Image (tube, rainbow, N blue to C red):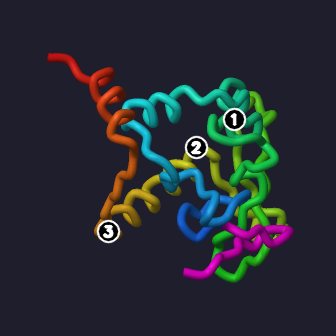
Amino acid sequence: MGSRKHQFLTNVELCPLCDQAGHNVSSCPWIYSKFKWLSDAINEFENPTSSSSLAGCYGCGGLNHWVRECPWILLNCKRLGCNDVMKLSTSTKASSYGLKFLKCQNVQCGKFMWLKDAIDADEKVKEEERKKVVQNVKIIVEMNIDDFIRDFKGKTTL
């Protein structure tokens, strides 16, 4: 698999494993580099120590990134024939005050989409892609037997 680039105002290189920016395959946070009990991994994922998860992205409200890494700030317009960028904005109209939306910067295109609808559509696409992927996974665990016994005793009850 080669690396892919998203075309925004600048090219951003993405990890070919998780399609996220800021790292490469060897440092991908979604790859286990050492053994970890599943309950510990879930706890770390659900209760991260990063302050971005506490305040969230003030662009889209997501909890797993800062606004400078927000995937919704500048997005390629997907309308056929339009090669411009959709920009994330906040409504100031009384009927929709404070709601986030995406609007194409090309005046001739003018595509508009509520951010909530865009996120829902993106999640549906990702879910469909997950259903299509068939993976054979082989996991090899290497650890000291004394460490395993100590951790195993701590995680089980009789």
Above or below: residue 14 compared with residue 2:
above
Q: Which dot, 3 or 2, sits closer to the camera?
A: 3
Residues packed near mark 2 inside 10 Å, few (<14), some (14 to 19) or many (20 plus): some
* Left or right of 85, for residue 27: left
Asked if the residue under mark 1 is in contact with the one under mark 2, i.e. CB atoms within 8 Å, the reply is yes
Determine the residue located farthest toward the top in the rendered image: 158
According to the picture, the residue beneath numbered tag 1 turns out to be 99
Task: State the extent of the magenta-drawn residues as a range.
Answer: 1-14
Q: CA distance from mark 3 to mark 2?
A: 31 Å
- Dot 1 falls on a residue whose secondary structure is loop
Which is more N-terminal, label 3 or label 1?
A: 1
Q: Position of residue 81 (x, y in %)?
A: 70, 82
Total tally of numbered discs in the picture: 3
Q: Position of residue 48 (x, y in %)?
A: 60, 30
Which is more N-terminal, label 1 or label 2?
A: 1
The quarter holding residue 15 reads bottom right
Residue at horizontal 81 percent and vertical 47 percent from the top:
68
Q: Position of residue 86 (x, y in %)?
A: 76, 61
According to the picture, the residue beneath numbered tag 3 turns out to be 135
* Left or right of 23, for residue 34: left
Q: Amino acid at mark 2?
A: Lys
Residue at horizontal 69 percent and vertical 56 percent from the top:
112
Above or below: residue 116 compared with residue 80:
above
Q: CA distance from mark 1 to mark 3?
A: 39 Å
According to the picture, the residue beneath numbered tag 2 turns out to be 116
Residues packed near mark 1 inside 10 Å, few (<14), some (14 to 19) or many (20 plus): some
Q: CA distance from mark 2 to mark 1?
A: 9 Å
Q: Nearer the viewer, residue 41 or 133?
A: 41
**Image quadrant in which the N terminus is located:** bottom right
